[in-house]
Image: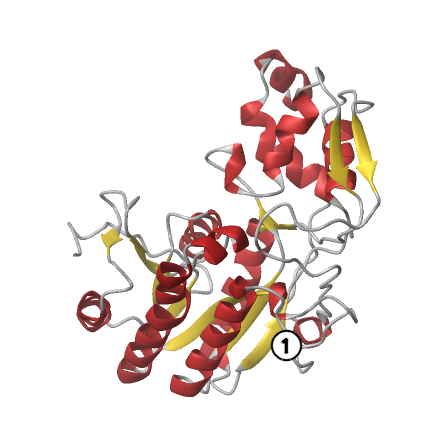
Amino acid sequence: MPGPEPQDCEGAGPGSGVRVLVTGATGLLGRSLCRQLRSDGWIVIATGFSRASPRMHQCDLTSEEQVQRLVRTHKPEVVVHCAAERRPDVVERASDSALNLNVHATATLAKEAATCGAFLVYISTDYVFDGRNPPYGEDDSPNPLNLYGRSKREGEREVQRHCPDCVILRVPILFGEVQRVEESAVTSLWSSVLDQSQTWSLDHVQQRFPTDVRDVSRVISNICSRRQQDPSLCGVFHFSGKEQMTKYEMSKSIAEAFELPSNHIVPVTDPAPSSGPASRPLNSRLNCSRLELIGLSVEPRPFRVAILDSLWPFTPDKKWRQTVFH
């Protein structure tokens, strides 16, 4: 279970040395969040499982015994639960293991957070909505179309049942500094931009709101900081990028950001069945006004700027980087 104690350093930021346990710290959001929290002065207890590094605590969240040992050993004051099986098609194909992580492990973690008195932040998804009547406010009734959305909705219910003073943060499709382009459905479009040897037909129907994990991480840190000042802060909140884009529009925007041709990318405007087993909502746009009204939101960085940061390490010609960044 926990390996050698990571040498977390307390900074001088708003975290003030408060202990925060982050699940899914090896994932796209988890990595970004750990960096942000450390920068803001929090003491981060980073956890992972199969990809856990020596500086992390290895924990199988589906093991009640391991979760209990982790929480009771480190006694975090805040728990941010990022870990999940977030790929809708994988959830459909491997439903038992996905539900075990997304629902049952969430319930176990929520129980332990309640036992030690920790403030719990649960990361959920816009896929709890069916996409038929956007934008969706926090109080609108969820109606997920696929098993992934249903599992995250059940996860929401579990954390609210065990930790009624928790915060649930729903976010849409995420991207950021990926370890491989396939890690995000947004950055995976890079292959369609680079490969000009064929025509790429991309969906131009489903509306998405790509959101940089660095912005999400700042919002989470803001929420945790405010909670230290105001113990009454709880409930459901939404955060999302503001730019509405289809896969086709994202690919075109990526090409423009890198000044690459895009004539080989064509839109598919006829609604068609999902390419995988999971159905997707047509437009699950989130209304984020609640977070904005209490001053905890951030201005999302423009997509073209953020995607440059995310994908430049994967450019085939490194001279491009020197030209653009120097």
Q: Classify 103 as above or below 307.
A: below
- State the residue at coordinates (25%, 58%): 60
Q: Classify 47 as above or below 131.
A: above
Q: Quadrant of residue 54?
A: top left
Q: Crowdedness of circle 1 by 10 Å Cα count: few (<14), some, many (20+)?
A: some
Q: Quadrant of the C terminus?
A: top right
**Is residue 258 among what the camera can see?**
yes
Please tell me how many numbered marks the rendered image carries: 1
- State the residue at coordinates (57%, 57%): 216
217 vs 320, left or right, is left
Mark 1 secondary-structure assignment: loop
For the residue pair 169 and 150, the one nearer the viewer reads as: 150
214 vs 33, left or right, is right
- State the residue at coordinates (47%, 70%): 122
Q: Residue 296 location, x and y as percent?
A: 62, 69
For the residue pair 257 and 284, the one nearer the viewer reads as: 284
Tag 1: amino acid: Pro
Q: Quadrant of the N terminus?
A: bottom left
Residue matched to label 1: 142
128 vs 67, left or right, is right
